[in-house]
Amino acid sequence: MSAPPKETPAQRVERVKREKAPWSILEDIKRYAREGIASIPDEDLNIRLKHWGIYTQGDGAGVRGKAVPFFLMRVRTPGGVLTADQAATIASISERYARSSLAVTVRGNFQLHWLTIEDLPAAWEEMAALGLTSMGACGDNTRTVVGCPLAGHQHDELIDVTSLALELDRFFNGHPDFANFPRKLKISITGCTHWCTYPEINDVGLTAARRGDDVGFHMRVGGGLSARPHLAVRLNAFLKPDQVLDALKAVAGIFRDSDVLRENRQKARLKFLFLDHGWTAESFLAEMERRLGYKLAPAGDEAVPEHTSRDHVGIHQQKQAGLYYAGFSVPGGRLTPAELLRLAELARTYGSGAMRLTTTQNVVLLDIPEDRLAAFRTAAADLGLPLGGSPFQRGTVSCTGIAFCKLALIETKAFSIKLAEELERRLPGYTNEVKLHVTGCPNDCGQHWIADVGLQGAAGGFDIFLGGGLGENAGFSQRVGLRLPPHEVADALERLFRFFQESREEGERFRTWVARSDQETLLTRLRG
Ligand code: SF4
């Protein structure tokens, strides 16, 4: 008799999820906390726990290393919405249970490391007391809904989506009908005209739009980065605000029921319906409307922003008369608990206590009255996080990298912080905005595809990519065919940015300059 065929990784994950729903193991997790990490069966440790926002972390050797008995935990902060009390709790949890590790992710969430299974229940209990959870922050479910950090506070927004973003997040997270997708489902929603929520690279991107006198939303589907990036396709549909939830249920249903996506974990995102299975915007909309049971109105007017990069750094006026918001630049997204605690104190003392996390890994404090601004500036000066900063500091984004990630090929966080400092030192007069994204492997959590300059980690160095960006003329960065060891990157980028300064036309953006430049010349400048 021949041996039964070996399960593929995708078949194994699907079987494990079918045999026992990942969200049903909460009592098991509490038992594991009492009995220790050795008591956790492999299928819970490496598959089901992810659905609770928990991963085992790497030993510092990345893809060549092993998992260690400590966990990464991602904390859901839908829309980046955060209160000073919640921030203080996260700071305290980081200090007591996570060796003071703390970072803001590119979806405006918190990520902590070094948690033990023994400490998880206590950390969760403290978080739950303030309405925070890690449930669903990783795994094959609906990830934290991303929203504009200035929703409700922005001058030029069509609609305040704060409550809708929170409602959508609450609805999908934990819902048994949406507990087992082929992989993750990422949703973003924005009511403003700048699109810093990156609708083009989410599985579902909702952007505010007008149709006649109505304000509602347009929907894009199937965006994503990783090894095969794909810009989301826009559906010819206009959603009234009260149609959004049903429309998202229909999209989530299509994703959940696409068994063809469950065959290969590398090709399991919604975008692969478009990339590999012949779906189009028209066929997707037709299937959505079949599930909805009615036709949606055609799309209305849309003004695609020329440029979507907004770091929300600095002090700016809100739409509420006499109130200001203050955005702090957080290098590499990495914070200390003391810094977060101080930010929470500043938010309470000078603002309303309302805070926001951004997709550029920064922190915003809201509602500072005009007559308190001077005192606020003085109090914030000793924090060590700038309210301004060089374009390099403000524009640098980094993934987790080899320090904790089991898939990483290279270190990213410390490298990106040092790189920004180095470029700032070498190019003190550089004032043009730049998006400089560093990612530790092709999975692209650092989003190098949408950066002016993208550095993708590889064996022994970084592959250089140039010219990505979203908004009007959205497109991915292009590989230039150069891999550099980390210590040579600053020299190469200094030459490139000097050349840009010399040869750009007035007001020209880096990305436009790259597009019109001779690629061989750019390569020569990078090589030096
Ligand atoms: Fe890890 Fe790669 Fe994602 Fe960076 S891009 S966090 S190295 S999986």
Image (tube, rainbow, N blue to C red):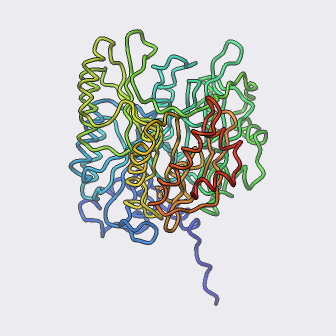
How many numbered dots are placed on residues in this image?
0
In terms of image quadrants, where is residue 298?
A: top right
**Residue 140 visible in the current orientation:** yes
Residue 415, x across and y down, in percent:
41, 55
Q: As drawn, which residue projects farthest toward the left?
A: 96
Residue 91, x across and y down, in percent:
26, 41
Residue 326, x across and y down, in percent:
37, 25
User: Measured along the vertical axis of the image, is residue 165 above or below residue 114?
Assistant: above
User: Measured along the vertical axis of the image, is residue 449 above or below residue 42?
Assistant: above
Task: Classify residue 444 as left or right of residue 46.
Answer: right
Task: Classify residue 417 as left or right of residue 176.
Answer: left
Q: As drawn, which residue projects farthest toward the top?
A: 321
Say which quadrant the N terminus sits in: bottom right
In terms of image quadrants, where is residue 43?
A: bottom left
Task: Classify residue 397 as left or right of residue 234.
Answer: left
Say which quadrant the C terminus sits in: bottom right
- Between residue 461 and residue 28, name the one nearer to us: 461
Identify the residue at horizontal 65%, vertical 33% (top origin). 505
User: Measured along the vertical axis of the image, is residue 99 above or below residue 13?
Assistant: above
- Between residue 136 and residue 300, name the one nearer to us: 300
**Residue 174 visible in the current orientation:** no
Q: As drawn, which residue projects farthest toward the bottom?
A: 1
